Image (cartoon, rainbow, N blue to C red):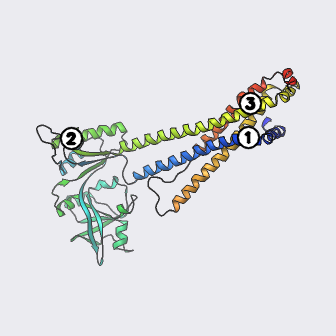
Amino acid sequence: MFLFNPDHWQEIGQTVRKHKLRTFLTAFSVAWGIFMLILLLGAGKGLENGVRYQFRDDATNSIWITPRRTSVPYRGLRPGRSVRFTDDDYRMVRDTIGGVEHITARFVLRGDFRVRYGDEYSTFGIRSVHPDHLYLENTLMQEGRFINELDIRDRRKVAAIGTRVVTSLFGRKNPIGEWIDINGIQYRVVGVFHDIGGEGEQRMIYIPISTGQVAYGGGNQIHRLMFTIGDASFDESKLIESKVVDLLSERHVFDPEDPRAMRVANLVEHYEQFAQLFKGIAVFVWLVGLGTIIAGIVGVSNIMFIAVKERTREIGIRKALGAPPSSIIGLFLLESITITVLAGYLGMVAGIGLIEGVQAVLQKMPSQPDFFRNPSVDFWTAATATLVLILAGVTAGYFPARRAAAVDPIEALRDE
């Protein structure tokens, strides 16, 4: 077979040794192009992972609505009015808006509360919520249970506590069934949860929203509505958002177009925006990398044209002895592909090695930066880069090889 003919490989080696500097510079341009492509793709993946990490604590298929103040007059009412949500708003959205999957309201208890168990005490954040809050913030129960509907109905003094709360107050003791004192009110611990949102989330204590409203003077007020919308697409999420905004604006008499009456955070929209952003970045990185590779291809192609010129007499002798054009084309293509692929793989190995080194350093850090996490290049990226290298080698060698195959043997033998 042509590929395994040792004479062909010997000829390629002789050509490379004859033009060491020229071959090195050309190979370096190809290696640099692949190196930069791999490096930029790995860095882009690290930034993408960092952005995804920001969403780790919240359901990405959720919408969060917080009442604020009106900023425009509406139906004869002045701007600057406070919008105040109540339990009725929670029930209206839950019962009348199609597409809402899990829904919770939150009555906000501001600041940290002094929490005591026996002789141990510390300060923690308290959130009063509905049972479905479990699905909004990736709260993972480790022991016991979360808040349930009976807790809400009966205004029970129960609490689900984070793992850091357990460590601070209970040490290694099982906290389930124990009573803790929160600002002078006794709550029975019914569950322990872990939250991937970090230490701040693990220092939270959840209590029934009805209990929080009564115990801390909230009446029927709620400070936030949060709900998931299943597998809704971006367009479907905007439709559901619009329906909820129309419902609430009608109930509280403000302009649904008022940008300050409510703060609406559609995480489906936010996630889609970031996804599109990083798709654009990936395309840009490929274009930059391919541009650099193309520059290397031009260099390889120029080398091959020079090689054809220098070996015109040799080509003429081959053709006079009966060598078919395909063998001459194959020889020059093999030389072009060899230079391109070997140089490209060196660049790829160097790029992947640098990315792995950066990742190892990040993993050894006490806390990784949130904006840049786990830079990496996956198998399909490496496979695509390999295909690009082979195509680049074929492209760089094809036209010089065609010229070599078209050499007239009589004219070639006259060449000095």
Relative depth, front residue between 138 and 356: 356
Relative depth, front residue between 220 and 73: 73
The mark that comes first in sequence, 1 or 3, is 1
The mark that comes first in sequence, 1 or 2, is 1
Residue under circle 3?
Answer: 305
Q: Which of the two discs, 1 and 2, sits closer to the camera?
A: 1
- For the N terminus, the image quarter is top right
Q: Identify whether 200 is placed above or below 1.
A: below
In the displayed structure image, the side of residue 356 where residue 1 appears, left or right: right
Q: CA distance from mark 2 to mark 3?
A: 73 Å
Circle 1 Cα neighbour tier, 10 Å, few/some/many (<14 / 14–19 / ≥20):
some
At mark 3, the secondary structure is helix
Residue under circle 2?
Answer: 247
Q: CA distance from mark 1 to mark 3?
A: 13 Å
- Residue at 28% over, 56% down: 131
Q: Tell me where residue 312 sits by quadrant.
A: top right
The mark that comes first in sequence, 2 or 3, is 2
Residue under circle 1?
Answer: 23
Q: Amino acid at mark 1?
A: Thr
